[in-house]
Amino acid sequence: MKVHSLTLTAALLILVSPPARAADTDSRADLAQARQDAIIVRAVERISGYDYRSDPAVAQAVKRQIRRSQGTPEFMRLVKRFKPDGIETQLVKTLVGQDRSSAVQSADLLLELEAGRKAIRRLLNSTDQSLSVIEALGLLGNGRAIHFLAEVASDAERPFDQRRAAVAGLTKSQGGEKRLVELATEKTLVGDTFLIAGALLSRSKDSGIRDAAAKVLPQPASKDAKPLPPIDELAKQRGDVAAGLKLFRGEATCANCHIVNDYGKDVGPNLSEIGTKLSREAMLTAVLAPSAGISHNYENFSVLTEEGQVITGLKISQTDNEVVIRTADAIDRTIPGEDVVTIKKSDKSIMPENLHHITGQQGLVDIVEYMMTLKKKG
């Protein structure tokens, strides 16, 4: 039987009156209050269009009932129904907690609230809690969650581990997979996640997504054109440090451009502490796809001279009078300003691609094993 809203409203006015406590113990009074709050909440849920915030006593009853239900399925249902002011503080605690099911529900509710979306942005900017939030958004996989994950994956200023987690999160839903392919197609996906994005999308259940990903996110192949294992599987393999050092200084020619502990040439970044800065997966990506994440100040430039010569390398300096380019051989070439026809920044790294064609798969793993030992002293 449908109860008229006026009858329910009148009943609320009676229910929100303070319960008699003179003869009750505190525990009995608390129990009576909980019972009364539950009745009020059920009544409010049945009144169409009623703003429970209009009566402070009713609003307090709703808040108490929500607080009591913390940690139960009822909590999420009540929060979704009433969206009480300030509830995002409680939801954030659940979002970054250990229970992943509750975290996903909290993420869903926070994304429905303007204050909740702001809270998620703050958490994503926190290095301590961002990965937990990204994981929950990936497991949620709805439109709003995908939007946040795409923002993270496209932000080159964010740490690699955040962008890597966002890419993995996008592959947990079909909508996310499609958005990831779009990011790669639009060239807004940050380059150093191309290999992991392509590897994860190659396992999609959707053949259309697999085909589209293969076109925009091709995976590296060995010298005989056989595909290498996916980057996340390669990262699980372990190599020989001594063999890696020998290759680094010899056949692989890494020391021709990089200094490690005072050994090598100063062309590319100093790698003496690279094992502290990069994960094994990021290290493999840097070697296999050197153009994917070129460090600032290490961009490759091409200078065309009046004589038709093209000189490529790092731009050490540029003035109206001259341009100084450091070549891959660690030679500084000074070109007079009047001899410069054009100077262009390249999207290709000065580091040669397909290093693994020289070293083979095991040699690649050995070099990375050696580089992982290059840690910050002390």
Image (tube, rainbow, N blue to C red):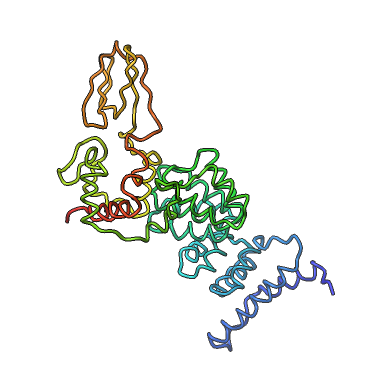
Q: Nearer the viewer, residue 157 or 129?
A: 157
Q: In which quadrant of the rendered view does residue 16 lie?
A: bottom right
Residue 170 as seen in the image, left or right of residue 351: right
Q: In which quadrant of the rendered view does residue 266 lie?
A: top left
Q: Residue at x 49, y 63 (%)?
A: 95
Residue 124 placement (x, y as % from top left):
45, 52
Picture layout, residue 49 above or below residue 340:
below
Residue lying farthest to the right in this orientation: 1
Picture layout, residue 241 above or below residue 216:
below
Q: Residue at x 48, y 53 (%)?
A: 199
Residue 234 placement (x, y as % from top left):
39, 57
Q: Residue at x 58, y 60 (%)?
A: 108
Q: Nearer the viewer, residue 356 or 55?
A: 356
Picture layout, residue 106 above or below residue 221:
below
Q: Residue at x 66, y 60 (%)?
A: 54
Q: In which quadrant of the rendered view does residue 109 lie?
A: bottom right
Picture layout, residue 27 above or below residue 142:
below
Q: Nearer the viewer, residue 357 or 16?
A: 357
Residue 374 placement (x, y as % from top left):
22, 52
Q: Quadrant of the N terminus?
A: bottom right
Residue lying farthest to the front in this orientation: 224
Residue 55 as seen in the image, left or right of residue 128: right
Residue 184 placement (x, y as % from top left):
52, 42
Residue 309 as seen in the image, left or right of residue 204: left
